[in-house]
Image (cartoon, grey):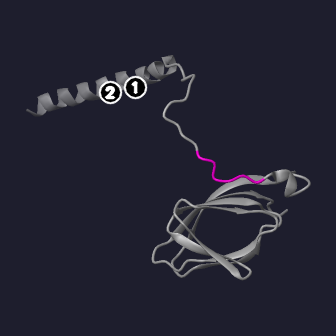
Amino acid sequence: MKHSALIWGGLAVAAGSLAIPLVPAVLAQMAPPAESKGVSSKLIGALPLALEFDRIESRQLRMRVVTLAPGGVFAVHSHKDRPSVEYVLKGSATEFKGEASKTYTEGDAVLADKNTTHWWRNDGTEPAIFVAVDVFNPPK
């Protein structure tokens, strides 16, 4: 019994090692698709960058997942040098601009241009999760 188990085990290892070189060869023969299929796109928001700043130089286009815990706040901040588009992926949070406030929920988008100064608060019971895309100028 032990002898046959060793033989079968050895055959399985040998078969596996023979298959490994074949996989890259098969993948290399596959032609990349020339047309997209099953893809959809929804524009969340767009800001004309020429109106935001004069020079692009060291700026980065960055994307972050930002989580605001229940009871949490983002302190007041300006987007004077950092335009952004933020998408609420999950939960809800309230944005405060001066005397005005607006609650954003899952699927909503927020555009913040050079004139935006605001802060946020999560009054919900679950985290608010944002996908934030901005043009960031890292400190030198």
Residue 27 horizontal/vertical position (percent): 47, 22
**Left or right position of 98 against 42:** right
Marks 2 and 1 close (CB-CB < 8 Å): yes
From the image, tell me which residue sits under label 2: 16
- Identify which amino acid the numbered label 2 is placed on: Gly
Which segment did they paint magenta? 42-47
User: Distance between the Cα atoms at labels 2 and 1?
Assistant: 6 Å
- For this orientation, the residue located farthest to the left is 1
The residue sitting at 36% across, 26% down in the picture is 17
Q: Where does the N terminus fall, quadrant-wise?
A: top left
The secondary structure type at the circle numbered 1 is helix
Residue 11 horizontal/vertical position (percent): 24, 24
Q: In this rendering, is residue 68 above or below 135?
A: below
From the image, tell me which residue sits under label 1: 20
Residue 18 horizontal/vertical position (percent): 35, 21
The residue sitting at 59% across, 46% down in the picture is 42
- Identify which amino acid the numbered label 1 is placed on: Ile
